[in-house]
Image (cartoon, rainbow, N blue to C red):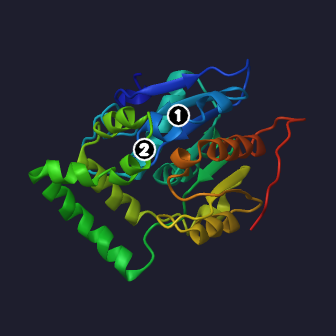
Amino acid sequence: MELASGRGRTFVREVAGPPAAPAVVLLHGLTAVADLNWFPVFDAVGAAFRVVSLEHRGYARGPVLRGPCRLTDLADDVAALADSLGVERFVPVGYSMGGAVAQLVWRRHPSRVAGLVLAGTASLFSVSARERFLSRLLPSASVAARAGPSAAGRFVGSTLRARFTGSPLAPWAVAELARHRPATMLAWAAALGRFSSASWIGAVDVPTAVVATSRDVLVPTERQLALAASIPGAHVVPVDGDHGVFITDQAAFTDAIVQACRLVTVNPGTPTGEVRNP
């Protein structure tokens, strides 16, 4: 699909949902792609919402990356997609890096955002001295990846590939991950390491739900809960799993995303289930 404002073309997955249903835009994580991150939830979320999922800039089916990797560009792509679809207001639903993008969509386009669902994500991704050091190394790693893309390709997405071991979906997952440009993924990882919404996330003024992965070590659960605590009135929807829960427990992940979407939209009479606040 062609994005508004001349921002290029991207891959879009849509589920029409019921007539006049609220729109949600699903934003994938760093080493996933749109379908790989969200395939478990399309049907369930689409039963109550209009669902749109796009591939990020610099990914194989996303807009062409020209210049440095900037998360703000990904946020602006989301607004441009909504313009192309004629969607005035929507709920960004972001997983991991997609959660940082969702926060930036609210920051840069607040009039377009009806609510936020932030899953497996945080207000900052680089806290310790070691993490800051590693994030500074990643741009150099991306240069090395261009020189030796085969080795880098084996590294990028290796964790997700391992999740599919023994699954009938493994060949499909491997093919999806093969779309990655390893140097670009490493550059996006460096950009994510520089991200912080800590100084402004407390000003979020739309209904927000944080889907917290309870055994996460990639984005530690305590950072996810700290994100929720920093947003006035934010709900916490816990899901028992680590950062790959969207693969390892698809039913639990789907239930959590559906519940979170219901919590942040006006949908009278719809049960929301158990919710725990931090």
Image quadrant for the N terminus?
A: top left
Q: Residue furthest right?
A: 269
Q: Nearer the viewer, residue 177 or 21?
A: 177
Point out residue 250 in the picture as x, y percentages from the top left corner.
59, 42
**Image depth: mark 1 or mark 2 in front:** 2
Q: CA distance from mark 1 to mark 2?
A: 14 Å
Q: Is residue 183 visible?
A: no
Q: Residues within 10 Å of mark 1 (few under 14, many from 20)?
A: some
Instruction: Say which amino acid is labelled 1.
Output: Phe
Instruction: Say which amino acid is labelled 2.
Output: Phe
Tell me if 125 is positioned left or right of 26 in this view. left
Say which quarter of the image contains residue 88.
Answer: top right
Q: Is residue 39 above or below residue 206?
A: above
Point out residue 74 in the picture as x, y percentages from the top left corner.
42, 44
Question: For mark 2, what is the residue?
Answer: 164
Name the residue located 60 percent from the left edge and 71 percent from the top edge: 222
Q: Are marks 1 and 2 in contact (CB under 8 Å)?
A: no
Image quadrant for the C terminus?
A: bottom right
Instruction: Say what secondary structure mark 2 lies in.
Output: loop
Instruction: Say what secondary structure mark 1 lies in.
Output: loop
Q: Is residue 21 above or below residue 165?
A: above
Point out residue 159 in the picture as x, y percentages from the top left corner.
38, 54
Q: Nearer the viewer, residue 179 or 113?
A: 179
Tell me if 169 is positioned left or right of 61 in this view. right
Q: Residues within 10 Å of mark 2 (few under 14, many from 20)?
A: some
Q: Residue furthest left?
A: 147
Question: For mark 1, what is the residue?
Answer: 39
